């Protein structure tokens, strides 16, 4: 019996040894190879992205002028605009018409046109509605074309207030950011936003000081002001004043 037990033990040990020394199957080798290749691919991809993006990541960040908050120095230094005029046609809005008034179809401004309609007013002058400082002047993206935003200070009931005038779809920009402008000064010409629309001026008045571009249409118009109503209420000119006057260089007018 002891001889049989010894022989059985030797057989078991030999079996264990053969199991340990059994080579891996081809299936296991294939799976390991795929894992290795995937790791190499991920490492190469990560290195490629790093070297492509590293210069951009190290580049100093500059905030677009269209999102910079107006500084307290700018707000304090703005001269008071004693009067507001309409931006196209005559000072009181003659020789122009409003094709899409404020809040119609959720519109946040007025679409002002020359009386000839269609593209008859293409290239016509656009004037600053009051004294102020240019916050933004440039390309504003699809659907907008060139845009100019001017910040104005005015007094109402003894309080100093601020309002923006916003000129959209303009063709030629004649001012630059941080430039002081005077009421009646030509700042642009009427455009088509690169041929998207018939020529017109998308004109807004806003209570904001930050010069963001904006949506143009919105259900909630809070922060936007009826442009025609605001200018009519702050004209400071007699009712029979027609025809745009020569540029006034006095910053209080």
Image (cartoon, grey):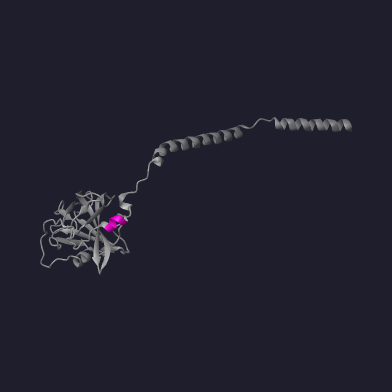
Q: Is residue 99 magenta?
A: no
Image quadrant containing the N terminus: top right
Name which quarter of the figure residue 235 lies in.
bottom left
Secondary structure mostly seen in magenta is helix
Answer with left or right where residue 19 lies relative to residue 252: right
Return the x and y of residue 26 as percentages of the image width and height. 61, 32
Return the x and y of residue 94 as percentages of the image width and height. 13, 62
* Residue in front for this viewpoint, 168 or 152: 152
Against 170, residue 37 (above or below) is above
Residue at position x 74%, y 30% from top? 17
Residue at position x 56%, y 33% from top? 33
Residue 107 visible, this angle = no
Residue 51 visible, this angle = yes
Name which quarter of the figure residue 93 lies in.
bottom left
- Residue at the outermost right position: 1
Image quadrant containing the C terminus: bottom left
* Residue in front for this viewpoint, 210 or 38: 210
* Residue in front for this viewpoint, 82 or 142: 82
Return the x and y of residue 218 as percentages of the image width and height. 31, 61
Give the total number of marks visible in the rendering. 0
The part of the chain drawn in magenta is 72-76
Against 108, residue 124 (above or below) is above
Q: Is residue 74 magenta?
A: yes
Residue at position x 30%, y 63% from top? 223
């Amino acid at each position: 019996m002891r001889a049989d037990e010894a022989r059985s033990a030797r057989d078991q040990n030999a079996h264990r040894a053969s199991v340990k020394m059994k080579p891996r199957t081809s299936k296991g080798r294939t799976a390991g190879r795929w894992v290795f290749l995937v790791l190499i691919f991920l490492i190469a991809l990560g290195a490629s992205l790093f070297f492509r993006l590293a210069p951009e990541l190290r580049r100093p960040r500059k905030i677009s002028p269209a999102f910079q908050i107006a500084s307290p120095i700018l707000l304090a230094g703005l001269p008071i605009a004693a009067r507001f005029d309409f931006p196209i046609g005559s000072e009181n809005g003659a020789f122009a018409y409003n094709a899409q008034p404020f809040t119609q179809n959720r519109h946040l401004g007025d679409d002002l046109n020359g009386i000839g309609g269609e593209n008859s007013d293409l290239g016509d002058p656009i004037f600053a509605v009051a004294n102020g400082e240019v916050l933004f002047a440039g390309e504003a993206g699809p659907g907008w074309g060139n845009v100019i935003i001017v910040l104005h200070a005015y007094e109402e009931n003894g309080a100093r207030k601020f309002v923006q005038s916003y000129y959209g779809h303009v063709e030629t920009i004649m001012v630059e950011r941080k430039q002081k402008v005077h009421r009646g000064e030509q700042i642009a010409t009427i455009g088509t936003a690169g041929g998207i629309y018939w020529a017109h001026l998308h004109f807004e008045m806003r209570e904001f000081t930050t010069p963001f571009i904006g949506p143009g249409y919105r259900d909630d118009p809070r922060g936007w002001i009826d442009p025609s109503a605001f200018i009519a209420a702050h004209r400071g000119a007699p009712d029979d004043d027609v025809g745009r006057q020569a540029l006034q260089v006095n910053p209080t007018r």
